[in-house]
Image (tube, helix red, strand yellow):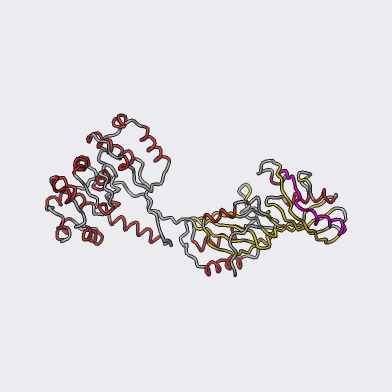
């Protein structure tokens, strides 16, 4: 077990006189054992004073093991107990050579630490730990592991530097700078970073001019502004079908005005939000379809990130029920293969998106009458290369460019003199509507130019999105 040694004596003396709390003194002495820090503040104070009182031959007697279990229990069970009550207790009498007078002085005179502003005093005591526990319990989260994250006031860095400089000066020794690093798990904000940066830049003599070393004793204890609970995001993936030609994938809002009342992402996520009790969500998918395009077949892969969910554990059966809930609540969409996935797995949906293939079915109208033979040649065209200028309809939000896309195969289905259905297998990212009507010559070749007559698209369906993620579930 690590403990204080004789070389620490002047450090303990100096910091104690300056109004530094026992836990700060321990860390400035590079005491690494967590156990020591867990002792109640008052006990630590007593032991440090003992350490100073005893001669060097007794340095090894600074051992906290003896008082640990009983004291800890007492503090937890009787947090309100005054000093006189503690004296009746057998456990505390195990601390060597502590007289009543000393105890009384220490208990009535707990100064706010000039380095940590009391953070390692009050907030290490059972009362505050209880407060944190109550907050966690009342927040009603499901979790299997957790990170305790503390956001510290930026001035702590300055105070630490001041304490460190004075030690360096007085000791005339180069102490290990690692010992003086602020506590980990801090959330960084600009001001904090600025303070740290400034501390890195400032010369020691300038710092000494601007800040009292050792740091002055503060009047007030640092207060805990907020105890916050947060769960890491969980991810749900699946495939969706869209059966409506009047439903956008994401909320359709122009100039703050809503154009259509719902969207694919809302129809799916409202149920997930309710079940996972999340704060918010982020929807992503493998490509997207226009508001008037249906997505049929096996559907389009999607993933939803649920931010700060309260509930995170779902069995396969529960996910299946959730899927049923979504599916029975709307006839505009259906979902399948609904499952929990990892953040990393979502990358698979996005990777190589351009290389993936998609199949479509388009209902096409021609101005001039057609016979079956007029369109049969389309079936023989393979790997047709297109040059597509950014379509007029998306030019307001996409840069003007010419992109090369490939129609892998086509299959025509004659309907009547002015209508036929075309099944296409294309490279992802191909603008199908433009391939049919030509977009005023901006897509070359196009169905109009191939048939040598004006053509337009009446209906478009996505028949499959060839992404083999998420895994298919049998149900
Ligand atoms: Zn302190």
Classify the position of the C terminus by image quarter. Answer: bottom right
Question: Count of labels shown?
Answer: 0
Residue 323, percent from left and from top: 57, 66
Drawn side of residue 196 relative to residue 236, left or right = left
Query: With respect to residue 72, does 396 lie above or below?
Result: above
Q: Is residue 378 magenta?
A: yes
Question: Magenta region: which residues?
Answer: 371-390
Tell me which residue sits at (37%, 38%) in the image: 196
Q: Is residue 338 magenta?
A: no
Front in this rendered view, residue 245 or 175: 175
Tell me which residue sits at (76%, 44%) in the image: 442
Residue 52, percent from left and from top: 16, 45
Quadrant assignment, res 302: bottom right
Tell me which residue sits at (61%, 64%) in the image: 335
Query: With respect to residue 5, does 213 lie above or below?
Result: above
Residue 55, percent from left and from top: 13, 45
Quadrant assignment, res 74: bottom left
Drawn side of residue 321 relative to residue 155, left or right = right
Front in this rendered view, residue 377 or 42: 377
Residue 317, percent from left and from top: 53, 70
């Amino acid at each position: 077990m690590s403990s204080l040694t004789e070389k620490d004596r002047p450090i303990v003396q100096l910091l104690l006189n300056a109004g530094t709390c026992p836990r700060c003194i321990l860390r400035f002495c590079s005491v690494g054992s967590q156990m020591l820090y867990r002792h109640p503040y008052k006990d630590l104070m007593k032991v440090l004073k003992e350490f100073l009182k005893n001669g060097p031959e007794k340095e090894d007697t600074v051992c906290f093991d003896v008082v640990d279990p009983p004291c800890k229990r007492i503090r937890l069970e009787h947090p309100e107990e005054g000093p006189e009550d503690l004296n009746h207790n057998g456990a505390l009498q195990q601390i060597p050579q502590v007289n009543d007078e000393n105890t009384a002085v220490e208990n009535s005179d707990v100064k706010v630490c000039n380095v940590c502003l009391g953070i390692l005093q009050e907030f290490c005591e059972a009362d505050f730990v209880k407060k944190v526990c109550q907050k966690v319990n009342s927040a009603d989260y499901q979790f299997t592991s957790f990170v305790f994250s503390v956001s510290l006031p930026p001035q702590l860095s300055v105070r630490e530097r001041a304490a460190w400089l004075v030690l360096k000066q007085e000791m005339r020794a180069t102490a290990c700078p690692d010992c003086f690093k602020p506590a980990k798990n801090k959330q960084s904000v600009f001001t904090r970073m600025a303070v740290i940066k400034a501390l890195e830049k400032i010369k020691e003599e300038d710092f000494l001019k601007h800040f009292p070393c050792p740091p002055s004793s503060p009047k007030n204890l640092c207060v805990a502004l907020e105890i916050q609970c947060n769960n890491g995001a969980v991810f749900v993936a699946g495939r969706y079908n869209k059966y409506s030609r009047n439903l956008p994938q994401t909320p359709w809002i122009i100039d703050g005005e809503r154009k259509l009342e719902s969207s694919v992402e809302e129809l799916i996520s409202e149920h997930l939000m309710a079940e996972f009790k999340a704060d918010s969500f982020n929807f992503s998918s493998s490509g997207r379809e226009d508001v008037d395009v249906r997505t049929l077949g096996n559907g389009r892969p999607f993933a939803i990130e649920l931010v700060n969910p309260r509930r995170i554990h779902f069995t396969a059966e529960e996910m299946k029920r959730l899927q049923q809930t979504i599916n029975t609540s709307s006839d505009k969409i259906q979902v399948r293969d609904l499952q929990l996935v990892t953040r990393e797995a979502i990358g698979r949906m996005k990777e190589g998106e351009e290389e993936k293939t998609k199949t479509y079915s388009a209902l096409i109208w021609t101005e001039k009458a057609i016979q079956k033979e007029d369109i049969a040649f389309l079936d023989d065209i393979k790997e047709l290369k297109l040059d597509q200028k950014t379509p007029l309809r998306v030019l307001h939000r996409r840069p003007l460019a010419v992109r090369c896309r490939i129609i892998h195969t086509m299959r025509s289905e004659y309907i009547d003199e002015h209508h036929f259905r075309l099944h296409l297998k294309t490279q992802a990212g191909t603008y199908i509507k433009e391939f049919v009507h030509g977009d005023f010559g901006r897509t070359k070749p196009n169905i109009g130019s191939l048939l040598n007559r004006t053509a337009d698209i009446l209906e478009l369906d996505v028949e499959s999105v060839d992404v083999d993620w998420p895994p298919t579930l049998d149900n």
